Image (cartoon, grey):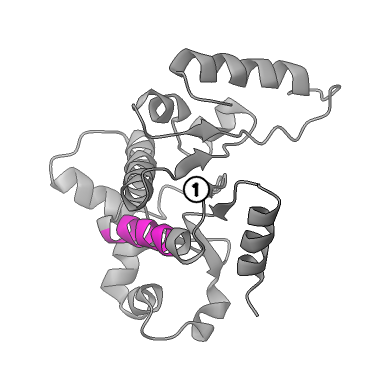
Amino acid sequence: FDPIRMLRDEAARQNLSFHIWINPMRGFAEQEIGLVPESFPIRRWYDDPALREQNLLFSEGVIYLNPASAQARELIASGAVEALNRYEADGVHIDDYFYPPKLSLEADAASYRQYLEEGGSLSQEDWRRENTWLMVKTLGEAVHAADAAAQFGVSPRGVSSQNYNDLYIDIARWLEEPGLLDYIAPQLYFGFAHDTAPFARAAEEWNALAEQYGVPL
């Protein structure tokens, strides 16, 4: 029984585009790690204290892949390509979970210290934005290399400031990179009378940004 294959086949019958939608960094509850086979990279990393510190982040009981790690970025990209190929999908789409909003600066302090020791000069906040940039660039390039016709899209949060300040993602930089994003689908889950982000105004702001960089909204 493969529900994703069933969805893929039905999408083909309906002449619909079918995209794999993933959370690139967020994993699962730490208490569930025992359910993961020991052969899986995330389990090997968790069981080894040095690899755990290098490749994983923890926030409110949930395991995240650390985008500061090249190994973690490659795992994310290879997982997306595996799903793309297995289901002959038309694209890959990533959700709005990046760094968890309440992640303390202590959570990835070891990775940041290593970055500084290797000559880095960015603040920890900007370094996090650099990490998510590298993660998305690695992921997008892997998707396009696996299938030149596949689309790669992102669903950022509907409020731009939250993306930049809370999740440490710089959407404008992603849009500016030629050929990286084939579209953006911001999560505008707001009513027309919303106090801080009414739908019409938020949609206009995102449309202006998309038009500025020539990326479909």
Q: Is residue 88 left or right of residue 44?
A: right
Question: Residue 10 location, x and y as percent?
Answer: 69, 59
Question: Residue 116 location, x and y as percent?
Answer: 19, 43
Q: Which residue is mark 1?
A: 91
User: Is residue 188 visible from the viewing direction of this image?
Assistant: yes
Nearest the viewer among 209 and 120 is: 209
Q: Amino acid at mark 1?
A: Gly
Nearest the viewer among 196 and 188 is: 188
Q: Few, some or many C-alpha atoms within 10 Å of disc 1 (few <14, some 14-19, many ≥20)? A: many
Question: Residue 201 location, x and y as percent?
Answer: 72, 16
Total marks shown come to: 1
Nearest the viewer among 112 and 99 is: 99
> Which residue is depicted at the point 63% across and 55% down?
12
Residue range in magenta is 71-82
Residue 18 painted magenta: no
Main secondary structure along the magenta-highlighted residues? helix
The quarter in which the N terminus is drawn is bottom right
